[in-house]
Amino acid sequence: MKSILLIGVNYRSYDALRAFMESVDRAASFVRQTMAVDVVVADNTEAAERQTISDTFAHIRSLTVYPSEKNAGYLGGALPIYNRLAQTYDWVSISNVDLQLHPDFFAEVLKAEEQAAWLAPDIYTAKILRHENPYMSQRPSRKNFLVWNIIYSSTFLYRIYRRLYLFKSRHHTISQQPCSIYAGHGSFMLFTKAFINRYPALQFPSYMYGEEIYLAELIHLANMRVVYTPDLKIENTGNVNTSQLRLIQKLNWSKTSLKIIAEQFFNSR
């Protein structure tokens, strides 16, 4: 029997987490004879606000919660779990929990290309009428990093950039066929046994943001592939709005991460 581990990173999102788990349980019910589904929640919520997470799901083999003493960030919360458990699974995902899997998700995973390193699903965000994948089709250049640094230095420039980006994406035709891309969207990243064998342990060099490029670069260095796989369908139910203060913090984190990633992977170009 094949096995899959879903690592969900939670921060104060217990209603969304419950809906996510229900969608996982529903999808797992269609592969009971062929795939074991385990879920580990990296709970970054502060202890005073932490809630009990129900484990009463009929088709999920196991649900484990790892509470963090502090908000360790996205990969900061997920990677210690990945490093401890990934090698015992055929697939491992790292994701937010404000998502819902399509009922046939795991059935389609069983059909997906096993030689790829990263399977990027069709993630649809209804609030902004956007398909998040393919996220990046081509590898960025050093010029891209310079432009991003300017954009992330100003909330005004970022808001203009974001509006143009979303407008363009709504009028973009999405491929219905699997294809190789540079990087998938970070809200749900699904890695195959080929990736796990090549990278059984990972350490992200920053706190937040830039995860997609970092992981895509590891795959690029290993001469492996990221494959957009549109038959894997997910609905992104997350809140896309942020306050001014939170936006400033997000932009600072983004600048820091991209600077580190550029120095590690792109300075020689």
Image (cartoon, helix red, strand yellow):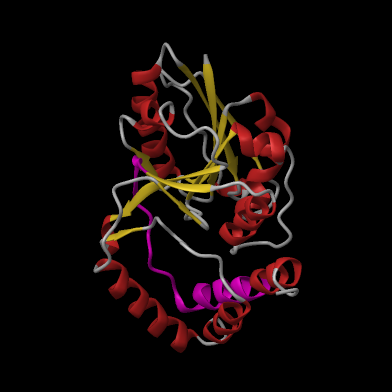
Where does residue 87 sit, x and y in percent of width and height? 69, 29
Q: Return the residue found at the far front.
A: 223
Q: Examine the image and state in which quarter residue 163 appears.
A: bottom left
Identify which residue, 29 or 189, lies in the foreground.
189
Which residue sits at x=38%, y=55%? 238
Identify which residue, 242 or 200, lies in the foreground.
200
Q: Which quadrant of the figure contains the C terminus?
A: bottom right
Which residue sits at x=28%, y=74%? 167
Asked if residue 62 can be seen in this view, the reply is no
Which residue sits at x=65%, y=47%? 77
Q: Which residues are magenta?
A: 230-256
Asked if residue 177 can be seen in this view, the reply is yes
Which residue sits at x=40%, y=28%? 111
67 to 128, vertically: above or below: above
167 to 50, vertically: above or below: below
Q: Is residue 96 left or right of residue 176?
A: right
Where does residue 222 sit, x and y in percent of width and height? 69, 48
